[in-house]
Image (tube, grey):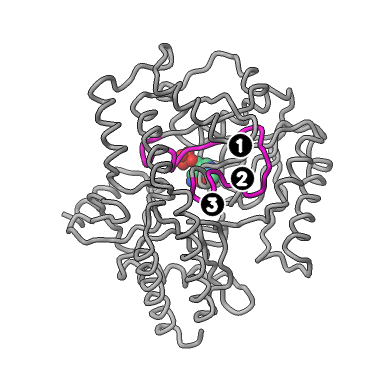
Amino acid sequence: MTDSLIERKRQFLVPSVSTYYQQPLIMDHGRGCYLYDVDGVEYLDFFGGILTVSVGHANATVNAAVCDQLSKMSHVSTLYVNEPMVELAERLAKLTPGDLQMSFFTSSGTEANETAIAMARIATGHHEIVALRHSYSGRSALAMSLTGQSNWRMGLAGVPGIVHARNPYYFRSQTHLSEEEFAKECAKDLEETILTATSGRIAAVIVEPIQGVGGFITPPDLYFAEIAEIAHKYGGLLIADEVQTGFGRTGKWFGIEHSGVKPDLMTFAKGMANGIPIGATIATKEVGEKYTGATISTFGGNPVTMRAALATLDVIESENLVGNALVQGNRLRNGLEVLQKKYPIIGDVRGKGLMQAMEFVRGEKEPAADLVNEFFEYTKEERLLIGKGGLYSNAVRIAPPLIVQAEQVEDALERLDRALAKVYERHPEL
Ligand code: PMP
């Protein structure tokens, strides 16, 4: 059955629906931090459906809220008001930093970013956008163009009006400067990009507090204050894309909060509703009020989705999962740093909270994507699920559900250790 399903998948889904591992895994069900394949084999899930299953697989509180709402009314559209939508918007306004107040709901992170860009353009009357190299914003034509990695553009040309500034990727910077000084240089590069590659008036600068798909590249906190000031200086707004970093992942409610910067717009998706498709854009009152034109997202504000998100937030709050992300994230980070000392192919360890990455290299930081691929087969043997990333496909991304416990972190570290040992066994030259 396994082989025939994989064959049917090849036949009926386009090849861009790609999978991990030489022999893809077919998952059947999940519980908490574990997934089970169709043969009942248990996997420790340290990627959570790409940072999405934040409060665990088959979470009882979220499922109860979804079932209750389904039994009442599954859909209504925004032509009528539904209470869960208003409640969630009000809750986001309270949770988010600064003066963010007015929300628009969609079904994905791509749409959330599309909405943020439209809001910024309408509010400022400007058109051009500055994004960062190595960023990822989604899969629409606009979002692919914002994305600072050609391997996620499918060979398609981008839309005009977007420029990319240098990102503070310290590990690959080849600089003699300190990390903070280098980040300041990157902020200067962003200003120079505006001055040299745009009309000089921008609608927005869009950034991820930690670049997710880019391989968890983590700029120093001071970078964000610098670029917020530059965005405003040239008439633009600061958009924080919190699709990966939002809702506790980094050990604070939102990734940008580590820097103290208060963005003009924020976007969310993924972990916000524990796996039920959602996207959201929140703006300051001043920006949000200008978004007046006719537009509708059929599933945006869907009451089932809204209930799933409200229940997810309830669980994060009642179980103090933001605090847990910090504590278990530090445990994970310390363990990865121990592995780094043992295995020199781990060139860099970076991230915040439960969003930690390792970058695999050979010699003088040569990206080692082949070793990541081998390592992945070994982690599969160890029944540990993790993610890949990075422009050079040599980053390993680790991001378990926020409910993860100390024993599971220790268990995952042991599995990673054994998988790394297997890579070294196969490559005595390393
Ligand atoms: N922004 C970021 C930072 C993301 O990581 C992603 C998804 N990987 C998106 C936007 C797009 O979200 P979606 O896949 O839900 O459209």
Q: Is residue 269 magenta?
A: yes
Marks 2,3: beta carbons within 8 A: no
Q: Is residue 196 magenta?
A: no
Q: Earlier in the sequence, mark 2 or mark 3?
A: 3
Write down the residue under mark 2.
257
Tags 2 and 1 touching, CB below 8 Å: yes
Q: Mark 3 packing: few (<14 Cα in 10 Å), some, or many (20+)? A: many
Measuring from the top left, give residue 249's x and y in whole percent.
49, 50
Give the side of residue 24 with respect to residue 421, left or right: left
Residue at left offset 76%, top offset 66%: 178
Distance CA(mark 2)–CA(mark 1): 7 Å
Which mark identifies residue 269?
Answer: none
Q: Is mark 1 on a helix, strand or loop?
A: loop
| Residue bearing the label numbered 1 | 97
How crowded pointer 2 is (Cα within 10 Å; few <14, some 14-19, many 20+) is rated as some
Quadrant holding the N terminus: bottom left
Q: Does the residue labelled 1 lie within 8 Å of ligand 1?
A: no
In the image, taking residue 60 as reference, residue 155 lies left or right, namely right
Q: Residue 403 in the image: x percent, y percent?
A: 37, 52
Q: What residue type is labelled 1?
A: Pro
Q: Do the residues labelled 1 and 3 touch (CB within 8 Å)?
A: no
Residue 103 in which image quadrant: top right
**In terms of secondary structure, where does tag 2 sit?**
helix
Residue range corresponding to the magenta coloring: 248-277
Q: Does the residue labelled 3 lie within 8 Å of ligand 1?
A: yes
Q: Going from the N terminus, do you reach mark 1 or mark 3 first?
A: 1
Q: Residues within 10 Å of mark 1 (few under 14, many from 20)?
A: some
* Numbered tag placed on residue 212 in the rendering: 3
Mark 3 element type: loop
Between residue 144 and residue 275, name the one nearer to us. Answer: 275
